Image (cartoon, rainbow, N blue to C red):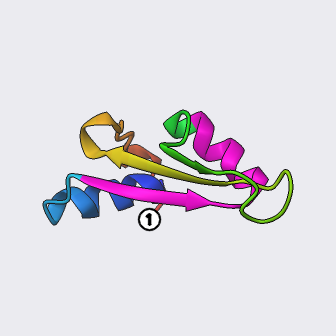
Amino acid sequence: MLLNAMYLALLGKGVNDFTLDSGYPTAQKVWRKMFGEPTYLMKDKWGEGFDHFIWHVKMDDVEIKYRLDSLHV
């Protein structure tokens, strides 16, 4: 839901794309699943076998999943 709020805020400001980066292996797995392969890969940035990933994401490529009935007010 947090990502959906971010997408809506970006769209509301007229933002067409954004970058997301991570050096944490666990986060990289999540972002890879959501956004595919990174646009840029900095091999061994944090030491041997520890890469840094950067995704350039276009707002046209994201799916906003938002349901009002999922909110508990």
Q: Is 1 or 68 nearer to us in this picture?
A: 1
Residue 8 at x, y = what percent? 27, 56
Residue 2 on image: x %, y %: 47, 59
Say which residue appears at 20% left-offset and 59% top-offset: 15
Amino acid type at image mark 1: Val
The residue drawn where x is 27% and y is 64% is 9
Look at the numbered disc 1 and give the secondary structure of its residue.
Answer: loop
Of 41 and 60, the residue lying toward us = 41
Relative image position of residue 37 (x, y in whole percent): 56, 35
Query: Residue 26 colored magenta?
Result: yes
* Span highlighted in magenta in the image: 17-33
Q: Which residue is mark 1?
A: 73
Image-quadrant location for residue 3: bottom left
Q: Quadrant of residue 18?
A: bottom left
Q: At 39% across and 52% down in the image, what residue appears?
A: 4
User: How many numbered marks, from 0 up?
Assistant: 1
Q: Residue furthest right?
A: 48
Residue name at image x 86 percent, y 56 percent: 48
Q: Nearer the viewer, residue 33 or 66?
A: 33
Left or right placement of residue 16 versus residue 6 in this view: left
Looking at the image, which residue sits at the far left?
14
Location of residue 72 with respect to 35 vertically, above or below: below
Q: Could you tell whether 5 is left or right of 54 in the image?
A: left
Q: Quadrant of the C terminus?
A: bottom left
Q: Is residue 28 left or right of residue 50?
A: left
Q: Residues within 10 Å of mark 1 (few under 14, many from 20)?
A: few
Query: Where does residue 71 sit, x and y in percent of width and height?
Result: 44, 55
